Image (tube, helix red, strand yellow):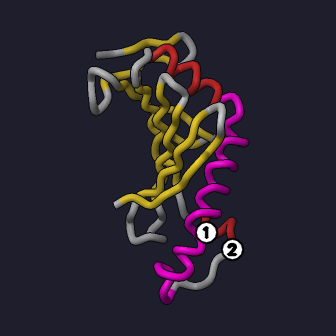
Amino acid sequence: MTFSHPELGEFRAGSDPDTTVEREWTWCDKPIRLVLSKDGGSFEEAAVHALELKAKERLWNAEFTDRIHAELFDTWNDVWRQDDPEMGKAEWLGRMTMESLDVTAEGFFTAYYRDGDLFWGHWIEVFGKTDEGAKHASMMG
């Protein structure tokens, strides 16, 4: 399945070809993967929410990274840091790289980050909704 959007461009089938499409995209001047999910709606609805995020991407990016820092920094410092030097917020967050942004027709999003080996190769995800903000950040296996 493919999907074409006048502003977002051409999408190819995603990991679940019946419900997701994806394409390379730019977020804060860096390449990421954008995934749209029907999730009980349509790709068009998911695209509207992706464009909402993109319109204020710098603010959203700050919200994502603030949520990561608020919820995971102490865990890193207390459990994972071991012999690594102490780091401030900017340096710590600077090690992470956003890899993809998944957006659903209902406006839910998940931003996935590489951890820069802070958590020994685990993924970091930030979950939320376009009308409610970033709600939770967690480390994934």
Q: Which residues are magenta?
A: 54-83
The residue beneath circle 1 is 92
Instruction: Pick whichever, 56 or 97, lies toward us.
Output: 56
Distance from Cα at disc 1 to Cα at disc 2: 6 Å
Q: In the image, residue 78 lies at what x, y percent?
A: 54, 82
Q: Name the magenta segment's main secondary structure.
A: helix
Q: Splitting the image into 4 quarters, where does residue 17 fall? A: top left
Label 1: few (<14), some or many (≥20) within 10 Å? Answer: some
- Is residue 77 part of the magenta span, yes or no? yes
Is residue 45 one of those drawn in magenta?
no
Residue at 59%, 70% (x, y): give it. 73
Asked which quadrant contains residue 139, the reply is: bottom left
Above or below: residue 84 compared with residue 135: below
**Tag 2: amino acid:** Gly
Task: Report the quarter where the C terminus lies.
Answer: bottom left
Residue in the image at 52% along x and 33% along y: 108
Residue 20, position as x, y percentages in the image: 35, 26
Residues under numbered marks 1 and 2 in contact, where contact means CB atoms less than 8 Å apart: yes
Q: Amino acid at mark 1?
A: Trp
Q: Which mark is residue 84?
A: none
Q: Which residue is mark 2?
A: 88
